[in-house]
Amino acid sequence: MNLTFHRKCVLMNYLGMPPMKKQKMKTPTNKNKNYVCLKAFELHTLLTENLIEFCQELKLIASSVMCYCGEPMAFAPRMERSDGYQWRCKKRKLHNIKFSIRAGTWFGKSKISIREILWICYMWVYEYSISSMLHECEHTKQTLVEWCSNCQNACQKILENKRNLIGGSDKLVEFFSCIYQNEKESNSQKWVMCAIEQFSTNVICLVVPNKESNTLLEIFDHYILPGTTVFGQIWDSLRDLSHHDFEYLTVDKEITFHDSVTRKDMDTIDKFRRIVNTSRTGTNHWNNVEYGPELCEYMYRKALSFAPDAYITFLKDLAMIYKPREVVQKKKFQR
């Protein structure tokens, strides 16, 4: 039996849900250039022969750029650059605009070749040790550590920028909260509400001013799909939830609140308040966890484990937060 399917059956049985029917697994394929299940040697070949096409298909670099003159810029060769190309518009003699294909991208502030950065990302996703990375490339330990740190920091940006709906019928979503530490706003305390959909790539981290019941009600209303079973360490924040709001969430949105300690569903307001008001000293392990890049990497890697291809998913998520420049503004080039 597939291990992931077995784990899901065990948890759903634990929550008292009906047994699942095992679905037939589809064989991964590279058809239509989905780049599913890329092996290391396949990636090396791809980055050597089709680097630019690969990056453009994943939107890591722009496929087209519009100049402020109204004309599309040319993707022009320039061998003195490590990437071999640049964007250029030469409409007339005094109009000679050019800039790097890295502008605005994940590769923007580095002197390492795009090919090498993508290879380092591959090794980071699949958790190569630093010693293994040193064996696989010619960069220094300091460079590799810096890029591993960049990938870790990117996990936090990715999670904080995700705004997809999560949950749904027979889906399990774990909620917990952490204190948000911001060096620029040391005087104001904020919170991060984290929601992890089990056995899925869906994760969201929302920075909120407080963790009161009204804040959680808004999160449930905007981001949690009907039919979701919610569990985790958030009951202290829901002590003031009104009867009307409870009815809205459990009846209108069909959300089920499940308590992991008592292993019971809270399907009435009386059950809900009885469990919420129960002392839970020592049961919330998230109280000792500091929100930051390390925690975000843990949550993001957990989500990646359910992706068709962890590496390609990571690159697509990077493209969503490091968007390449597609339009040139005139003021950037005024003398």
Image (cartoon, helix red, strand yellow):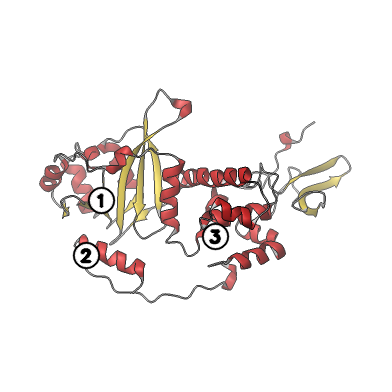
**Residue placed most toward the observer, 83 or 138:** 138
Disc number placed over residue 13 in the picture, else none: 2
Query: In the drawing, does residue 141 fall left or right of residue 248?
Result: right
- Find residue 200 and name its label: none
Determine contact: label 2, label 3, CB under 8 Å.
Answer: no
Quarter of the image where one finds residue 57: bottom right
| First in sequence: mark 2 vs mark 1 | 2
Badge 1 is on which residue?
A: 231
* Earlier sequence position, callout 2 versus callout 3: 2
Tag 1: Cα neighbours inside 10 Å, few (<14), some, or many (≥20)?
many
Q: Give the camera-side residue of 96 and 321.
A: 321
Q: Position of residue 135 (x, y in %)?
A: 62, 56
Picture quarter with the N terminus: bottom left
Label 1, secondary structure: give it. strand
158 sits to left or right of 288? right
Element under label 3?
helix
Residues under numbered marks 1 and 3 in contact, where contact means CB atoms less than 8 Å apart:
no
Q: CA distance from mark 2 to mark 3?
A: 33 Å
- Which percent across, then down, holds residue 16? 19, 62
For the question of whether residue 163 can be seen, the reply is: no
Query: Farthest residue toward the right?
Result: 93
Q: Nearer the viewer, residue 126 or 77?
A: 126
| Few, some or many residues within 10 Å of mark 3 (<14, 14–19, 20+) | many
Question: Which residue is located at x 47 percent, y 28 percent?
Answer: 183
The kind of residue tagged 2 is Asn
Badge 2: residue crowd in 10 Å (few <14, some 14–19, many ≥20): few
Q: Which residue is mark 3?
A: 312
Q: Amino acid at mark 3?
A: Ile
Please state the horizontal and vertical placement of residue 29, each as a whole percent of the image. Answer: 53, 73
